[in-house]
Amino acid sequence: MSSDPFEESLPDIQNFTILTSGLDHDDDDEKVVENGLDYEVDEKDEQINKRKPKKMRSEEVREEKEAKRLEREMLKQQRAQEKAEAKVLKEAEKTSRRAMKPGTCLMYVRVQLDRHLLEHPDASQVISHLVAAEIKFEIVDSPVSCTATVVRIDPLSMQETLAEDAVILLPVVKFIELVERQIYHNGIAGLIHQCKQWKMELGNPRLTLVVAGIQNYFRYIEMSYCQ
């Protein structure tokens, strides 16, 4: 059986490409093929896209310059602050050393005298000694009668603090009474008990008792024995 050349089966055509002439589109447009898809890009859009990165780079440069300027300004302020703090510290050390010199340290001390001390016969001598030493003093109402306390002044902060010592002036009669109670009454309301009470009222300082008239008392006792 003879075969007819026109009876041959045609192959299946699944993929084909259409070729177009370069004259079919405008010269201003450019065809771009990407991932099997083609699209046109206008030259004006392409120029805008080219200019945009330059603008962004310019903005980044400007921001970088501004950040460096701020960093320099912060370092400048930090150095100025450190310099000022060093100057203040140096002045404080100088003031502290000056305050410790003899004759100068008393400028930062103030004595508080209970007003009942003024009633004592020797009160004028106490005040005259304070004046001669150029020590400031003030008259106050102390919780314990006839007490003298010292206030220290910090030469840097000028803050006042009460010293750890207190002086109490005792008449000899009161002192003898407290000693007798301590010895002959088992310490009830005696000298030790009274000192603890004074410390509590004054804020727990170290106490110094000054007995006024003790020499006259001993002289009186001696004369009494002789008679």
Image: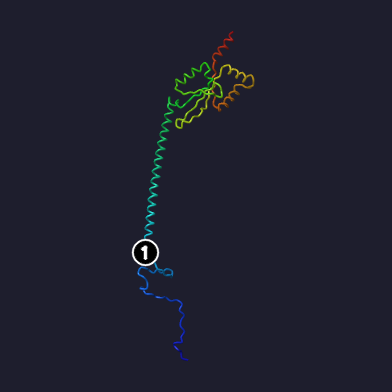
Find residue 178 and report its horizontal and vertical position in percent. Answer: 60, 19
Residue 57 higher or lower than 26, as above or below: above
Instruction: Locate residue 196: give its quadrant.
Output: top right
Q: Position of residue 215 (x, y in %)?
A: 54, 14
Q: Quadrant of residue 116?
A: top right
Count every numbered label the image shows and give the total.
1
Of 101 and 226, which appears nearest the observer?
A: 101
Furthest residue toward right: 185
Secondary structure type for disc 1: helix
Residue 43 drawn at (x, y percent): 36, 65
In this figure, which colouring scheme has been used for the structure? rainbow
Residue for badge 1: 44
Q: Closest to the observer: 54 or 97?
A: 54
The x and y percentages for residue 70 are: 39, 47
Q: Residue at x 37, y 64 (%)?
A: 44
- Where 93 sits versus 217, above or below? below
Residue type pointed to by label 1: Lys
Q: Nearer the viewer, residue 100 or 53?
A: 53
Q: Is residue 5 above or below residue 106?
A: below
Hey, which residue is sitting farthest bottom in the picture? 1
Image quarter hosting the C terminus = top right
23 or 210: nearer the viewer: 23
Q: Residues within 10 Å of mark 1 (few under 14, many from 20)?
A: few
